[in-house]
Image (cartoon, helix red, strand yellow):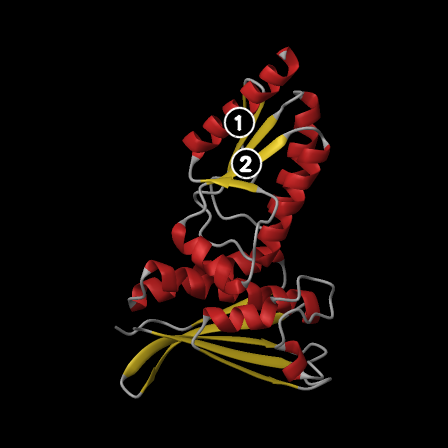
């Protein structure tokens, strides 16, 4: 079933709530079960939170994707913030530069099936995370 | 949206009604810390049944809330974490270490009742 793509601008904590609620409704309409929907919504929440924390502003794009006759939901978190100098380091459990729990990215990767970061210092960050329908 | 806080005997019950922003959660934390003193409460129940996401910020704030309330002399019980929320929290690597969590409001009230009896028995014995 085709589902409309959504773009949510992230500027405040209310936008974090809006993004995850839109992600939840998109995933539900696409046919995901409750556990997967919750994992997707939680991942969106963490990605939106990182945008606020590190870049202060950015966007979350939610869309459905198809590959090899499989369907899924893709979450793209994009910002023009400071970027990540060492992506490998940022993906280690316990690493953080903003004095938070430091679980953000590795934990978020565990909630999704695919996870890709494109970032370098000064050029912002684009994180793409996909969850496939089982 | 503010979270309604009910007073029942020496307990406070914060019954979350909808998704909360970070600011709402911090307001709830401050409000509970204040009311525990105002009502001389011994127990606080935070009902999160309707929350469909408990992310890193929410977990950290709940832990902080429980610790602040403990320092004010009351016990916190978090009730109603849904199974899929628990699953996502574990995947994300979050925990509520040091915070009492029970299944639902009924269990929460029973837990605080047992704590109350234990206090009375201790004071009497």
Q: Residue B112 has which mark?
A: 1
The foreground one among B11 and A123 is: B11
- Callout 1 touching callout 2 (CB < 8 Å): yes
- Whether residue B23 is visible, yes or no, is no
Secondary structure of the residue carrying tag 2 is strand
Measured as percent of width and height from the top left, residue A12 is found at 63, 59
Within the image, what quadrant is residue A122 found in? bottom right
Task: Confirm whether circles 1 and 2 share one chain.
Answer: yes
Question: Is B69 displayed left or right of A46 in the figure?
Answer: right
Measured as percent of width and height from the top left, residue B94 is found at 56, 58
Residue for point 51% across, 41% down: B101
Subunit bearing disc 2: B
Mark 1 or mark 2: name the one nearer the start of the chain: 2
Task: Determine whether B109 is above or below A17 in the image.
Answer: above
The foreground one among B105 and B6 is: B105
How far apart marks 1 and 2 lie (CA) works out to 8 Å
Secondary structure of the residue carrying tag 1 is helix
Could you classify mark 2 by the number of other residues whose Cα lies within 10 Å: few (under 14), some (14-19), or many (20 or more)? many
**Image quarter in which the C terminus of chain B is found:** top right
- Whether residue B32 is visible, yes or no, is yes
Measured as percent of width and height from the top left, residue B39 is found at 65, 20
Residue for point 40% across, 55% down: B84
The foreground one among A106 and A44 is: A106
Say which residue label 2 marks.
B77
The foreground one among A91 and A123 is: A91
């Amino acid at each position: 079933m085709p589902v409309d793509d959504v773009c949510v601008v992230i500027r405040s904590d209310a936008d974090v709530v809006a993004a995850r609620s839109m992600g939840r409704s998109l995933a539900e309409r696409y046919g995901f079960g409750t556990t997967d929907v919750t994992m997707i919504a939680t991942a969106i929440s963490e990605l939106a939170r990182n945008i606020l924390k590190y870049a202060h502003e950015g966007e979350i794009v939610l869309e459905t994707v198809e590959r090899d006759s499989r369907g899924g939901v893709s979450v793209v978190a994009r910002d023009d913030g400071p970027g990540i100098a060492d992506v490998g380091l940022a993906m280690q459990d316990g690493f953080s530069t903003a004095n938070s729990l430091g679980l953000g990215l590795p934990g978020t990767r565990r909630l999704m099936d695919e996870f890709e970061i494109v970032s370098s210092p000064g050029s912002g960050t684009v994180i793409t995370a996909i969850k496939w329908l089982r | 949206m503010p979270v309604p806080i009910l007073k029942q005997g020496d307990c406070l019950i914060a019954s979350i009604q909808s998704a909360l922003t970070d600011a709402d959660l911090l307001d709830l934390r401050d409000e509970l810390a204040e009311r525990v003193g105002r009502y001389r409460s011994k127990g606080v129940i935070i009902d999160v049944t309707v929350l469909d996401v408990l992310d890193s910020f929410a977990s950290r704030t709940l832990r902080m809330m429980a610790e602040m309330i403990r320092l004010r002399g009351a016990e916190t019980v978090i009730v109603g974490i849904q199974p899929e929320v628990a699953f996502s929290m574990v995947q994300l690597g979050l925990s509520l270490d040091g915070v009492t969590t029970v299944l639902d409001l009924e269990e929460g009230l029973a837990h605080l009742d047992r704590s109350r009896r234990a206090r009375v028995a201790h004071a009497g014995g």
